[in-house]
Image (cartoon, rainbow, N blue to C red):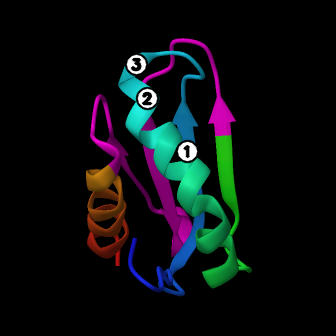
Amino acid sequence: MSAKFVFPRALKELRVHLSQTDSASQGLRNFLVKQYPALKRDNPNTPILIREALGVRPTVFARFERGRESRIHLDSVAEKDIEGSIKKLIDGGN
């Protein structure tokens, strides 16, 4: 992951849905285990919500100003590609 992963001010919330056991969520799970502390350190005022549910499709939602929301599905995406996918999601919402 980059040295800093600072979210834009327009981003009000990042929400992550994933399965605790499904192999399609493995890359996202690994990314969160390793990078969540840095994400929170670099973005202390942005809520990052992690929702685990059995069999749910791995998805990241970004909520922006005025209630606008975007999402990206991360089925079987490799851990090394998760950061780029999240950046695209966030940058596309600005």
Residue 55 included in the magenta stretch of the image: yes
Could you tell me if the residues under marks 1 and 2 are in contact, i.e. CB atoms within 8 Å? no
Marks 2 and 3, how far apart at CA:
5 Å
Q: Is residue 30 above or below residue 94?
A: above
Residues rendered magenta in the picture:
51-79
Q: Are marks 3 and 1 in contact (CB under 8 Å)?
A: no
Query: In the drawing, what numbered circle is on residue 23?
Result: 3
> Dot 2: few (<14), some (14–19), or many (≥20) neighbours within 10 Å?
many
Residue named by callout 2: 25
Relative placement, left or right, of 7 versus 92 is right
Residue kind at label 1, given as amino acid type: Val
Residue 8 higher or lower than 33, as above or below: below
Going from N to C along the chain, the mark reached first, 1 or 2, is 1
Question: Residue at the spot x=50%, y=19% of the render?
Answer: 56
Under tag 3, what secondary structure?
Answer: helix
Check if residue 47 falls in the magenta segment.
Answer: no
Q: How far apart are labels 3 and 1 at the CA level?
A: 16 Å
* Callout 1: SS: strand
Does label 3 or label 1 sit earlier along the sequence?
1
Which residue corresponds to mark 1? 16
